[in-house]
Amino acid sequence: DTGVSQDPRHKITKRGQNVTFRCDPISEHNRLYWYRQTLGQGPEFLTYFQNEAQLEKSRLLSDRFSAERPKGSFSTLEIQRTEQGDSAMYLCASSWTSGSGGTDEQYFGPGTRLTVT
Amino acid sequence: AQSVAQPEDQVNVAEGNPLTVKCTYSVSGNPYLFWYVQYPNRGLQFLLKYITGDNLVKGSYGFEAEFNKSQTSFHLKKPSALVSDSALYFCAVRDVMDSNYQLIWGAGTKLIIKP
């Protein structure tokens, strides 16, 4: 296992189309995070999972955004009815957190760059 | 509210000189602090973290950072800069008591090392 992987690396879509991104975390990690990053900004937290449970989703940008992690392994982020403002880099990260807490050192994938035309 | 400030959008340093990238934070409780680096077209890479203990933290690629509680700062440093250190650097903080383990990120500082 060489790290967090994301697919695709680049996605160009037309406004109004749906897109889905995939993230494969480091295999022994139990937490998985999705972020959005726009040019000149730090990552913006969207949602995260612990195993298959989505523990925080209030930061998803709108109801057009949804994420799943059905078996506690890979995750998908879907954006429905894309808008030009959705153009950004979407980052996935994973970490290991024990039940007694953890320092949550997150490891990031290379990101998926979305361009909505 | 939790926040992170990186007051410099860009830092220019000559190769071989020491470098400092500044970060200040605000959390309601005790902080966990992180530095990440981002090279063009690549994901964020973890550099170092402060959890507890020694205020001077050593990390990857010869970087270190000093935690200063009274000044709520966590500046990134390196004694001798390399051209290959040129990249975008992000500081992040988490409140120890935040059960969501949510990281709050600074806007990033572009570090340019000139030969």
Image (tube, grey):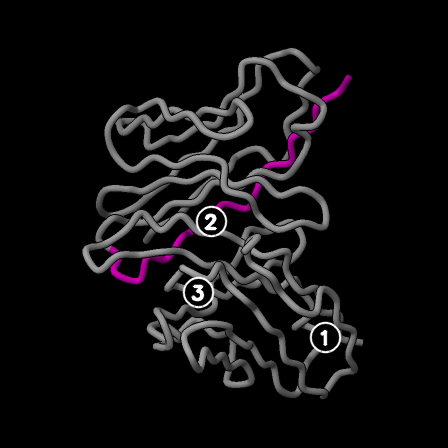
Is the C terminus of chain A in the top left, top right, bottom left or bottom right quadrant?
A: bottom right
In the rendered image, which residue does mark 1 sit on? Answer: A84
Q: Amino acid at mark 2?
A: Trp
Q: Between marks 3 and 2, how big is the CA–CA gap?
A: 17 Å
- The stretch of residues the image draws in magenta is B98-115
Q: From the image, state whether disc 3 or disc 2 is nearer to you.
A: 3
Does B96 lie within the magenta span? no
Q: Between marks 3 and 1, how big is the CA–CA gap?
A: 26 Å
Q: Between marks 2 and 1, how big is the CA–CA gap?
A: 24 Å
Q: Position of residue A104 (x, y in %)?
A: 35, 51
Query: Residue at position x 75%, y 20% from top?
Result: B114
- Tell me the crowding category of disc 3: few under 14, some 14 to 19, or many 20 or more residues within 10 angstroms, Cα based: many
Number of numbered markers = 3
Q: Position of residue B108 (x, y in %)?
A: 57, 42
Q: Position of residue B25 (x, y in %)?
A: 37, 40
Query: Residue at position x 25%, y 34% from top?
Result: B52
Drawn side of residue B66 relative to residue B54, left or right: right
State which tag comes first along the sequence, 3 or 1.
Answer: 3
State the SS at label 3: strand
Q: Position of residue B81 (x, y in %)?
A: 63, 18
Q: Amino acid at mark 1?
A: Gln
Residue B34 vertical position relative to residue A15 in the rendered view, above or below: above
Q: Chain of mark 2?
A: B
Does B108 lie within the magenta span? yes
Q: From the image, state whether disc 3 or disc 1 is nearer to you.
A: 3
In the rendered image, which residue does mark 2 sit on? Answer: B105
In the rendered image, which residue does mark 3 sit on? Answer: A32
Q: Chain of mark 1?
A: A
Quadrant of the image occupied by residue B33:
top left
Is the N terminus of chain A in the top left, top right, bottom left or bottom right quadrant?
A: bottom right
